[in-house]
Amino acid sequence: MMPHWEDAGFQQIVCPHFDVAGFAGRQVEGFLDVAHFAWIHTETFADPENQAVPPYNPVETSYGFSVDYWSSVSNYSADSDRQAPEGFQWLRHFEMHLPFTATLTIHFPQQEKLVIMNAASPVSARKTRLFAPIARNFDLHIPVAEVHAFNHRVFEEDRLMVETQRPERLPLDLTLEAHIPADRSSIAYRRGLKKQGFGDFFLV
Ligand SMILES: [Fe+2]
């Protein structure tokens, strides 16, 4: 389920678990969302000026769905002096294993790959414990503590978003919230949850 975890040349990093005061579905939806980088992750990797969301299409699979998302949004840390070549298109490949585990493989220049698993474990209807193993085949000399620290900052940016979203549950009736093409992963996710029988399972 975790791409490249056991491949030669890849380092395995297990980030400390991370708690979010919100429903696991909301947390996962945030992880899948490709439209939020320029709004939420500006301190860590995203350029606030680059808000475009090119079209993409989730593809149904036996485990849920997968998405290939191509864009010019760099994934180099904002503190890094590395830059992608002019015109480089970044591929972010998502695999959504319903209901609450997703993986994201980010394709950097020069065949460098970073895989992040977002395993959201519901602690209660409104609490989630996030487990996030990481595999990568570059920057192997950088101490893992720095990787933990960077990802902690990214998770913090997402946490604030997830904890303030309303309604707290995910409206699985897709007519209830307005959707735009940038939300295709969100729609695919909600459809998938509904198909699995996650209806209005908590209302109080
Ligand atoms: Fe995020």
Image: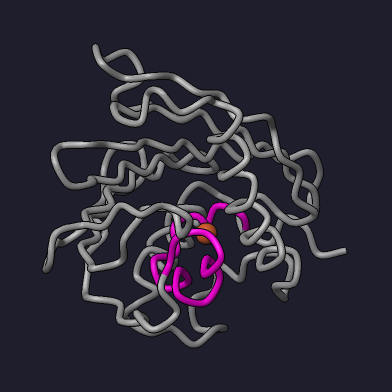
Q: Nearer the viewer, residue 23 or 38?
A: 38
**Which colour scheme appears in the figure?**
one colour
Q: Give the number of marks.
A: 0
Q: Is residue 189 left or right of residue 60?
A: right
* 130 and 111: which is toward the camera: 111
Q: Residue at position x 44%, y 42% from top?
A: 102
Q: Is residue 196 left or right of residue 160?
A: left
Horizontal and vertical percent position of residue 149? 63, 40
For the magenta stretch, what is the residue range?
27-46
Q: Position of residue 83 (x, y in %)?
A: 26, 57
Residue at the extreme bottom: 178
Question: What residue occupies the far right of the structure in this picture?
Answer: 204
Identify the residue shown where x is 29% and y is 26%: 137
Image quarter hosting the C terminus: bottom right
Is 38 magenta? The answer is: yes
Q: Is residue 200 magenta?
A: no
Q: Position of residue 11 (x, y in %)?
A: 38, 19
Asked if 161 appears above or below 154 in the picture, the reply is below
Quarter of the image for residue 192 reads: bottom left
Please report the residue visible at 45 percent of the width from the left and 68 percent of the height from the top.
37
Tell me residue 49's x, y (percent).
39, 84
Q: Is residue 197 visible?
A: yes
Image quadrant holding the N terminus, namely top left
Of residues 116 and 23, the one drawn nearer to the viewer in this rendering: 116
The answer to whether any part of residue 199 appears in the image is: no
Instruction: Say left or right for 158 vs 102.
Output: right
Give left or right: position of 82 versus 155.
left
Q: Is residue 187 above or below residue 76?
A: below
Q: Write the residue at 62% across / 60% down.
A: 158
